[in-house]
Image: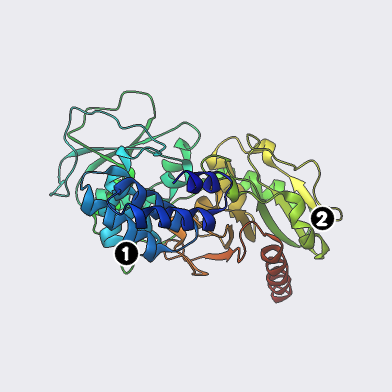
Amino acid sequence: RNLAAVYDGRDQVPLSIQHLQKALSVQPQDPEGWVNLSSLRRRVKDYPGAVEAAERAVRMKPNNPNAHGNLGLSLLAMGDYDRGFSEYEWRWRCDNFTSPQRDFSQPMWDGSDPTGRRIFVHSEQGYGDTIQFARFIPMLAARGATVYLEAVTYIKPLLATLQGVTRVVTAGTRPPEYDLQIPLLSLPRIFKTNAANIPNDVPYLRSDSERLARWKQQIDSIGPGMKVGLIWAGNVKPDASRTCPLQNFAPLAELNDIRFVGLQKRDNPSGAETPPAGMDFTDMSADLKDFAETAAAMMNLDLIVTIDTSSAHLAGALGRPTWTLLPWAADWRWLSDREDSPWYPTMRLFRQQTKGDWQPVIERIAQELGKARDSRV
């Protein structure tokens, strides 16, 4: 087990799995060992194996949160949303969950008829999670609820465009009086979401006319040609693999008649000051004060090319043509091998085929981008 931990720390996951399997062959009645094996198998995209290991841990220790958490993430990555979202409710008790559990005096909505009830939907995790699962708010309102949706200031103006929201409440402030509450990412379970009924009508978020007009003028000013937004860096935590340095996009600089617009948030290590040589690149990040501004910029672009970060979810929610670059073992929401997303019908997925190697991904994007440019002529 110690050897497995050492190899895990060096990101040598296959060797870690090998030693952990040997340890479990000696001591099979070790639920924590099976939990660890489940996590490791997820990292090498062995989702059936991860499910098997997590289920063994659950049988040994039924109330082990990390066993259920691994089981939920593995099932979700396989597209088994019926079981996956149920197991995902254990996330609040898992050691590595990014949002603290909160106490509320009002009960959690259990899916019963909400007609005439005031429901406070509180935020969790990151911006991308909020954008992706905000699609369930109109469904909740359509069932007769008055919906108060919590959001941080940076995303609040954008969510105000969401159909069915009575009020967007600033995170950290006291919401209006309400009858029931629910975390945002618990809504898919309540609505019995599966692969066949994902609510994916886009756009479900919009931009206002004043911002649209202002950004149209700004983007038009960079000249004619196909205009492509670029986002290349995600937050290092929780996943450093979701960043592709801007210099890696050098093959795109060889394409004529394409103007690239930098939409990278300034609070990430940017590299926007040194784009690849020869790239027609304009950095517009300084004017992206919040997500509503980013949305208006995206609405005036022909295509968004983005790493797996909140901007991918924003572009998808706006119904913009979006190409998303994914690391080899991508997050569960992108499933395992698909080149499209059931969550965002206007999105294409470009996956690493070898861990950490972006070059073939960028070269393929360059080829596809050339085809897209030529089809416009």
Q: CA distance from mark 2 to mark 1?
A: 42 Å
Task: Please state which amino acid type lies under the numbered disc 2.
Answer: Met
Mark 1 highlights which residue?
80
Does residue 76 sit above or below 122 in this rendering?
below
Q: Which residue is at 48% across, 38% downward?
A: 155
Residue 53's disc number: none
Q: Position of residue 139 (x, y in %)?
A: 28, 53
> Can residue 144 be seen in the rendering of this structure?
yes
Mark 2 highlights which residue?
279
Does residue 246 sit above or below 44 in this rendering?
above
Nearer to us: label 2 or label 1: 1
Question: In what element is the residue under mark 1?
Answer: loop
Does residue 329 sit above or below 293 in this rendering?
below
Q: Reading the chain from its start, which is encountered first: label 2 or label 1?
A: 1
Total marks placed = 2
Q: Position of residue 326 (x, y in %)?
A: 57, 58
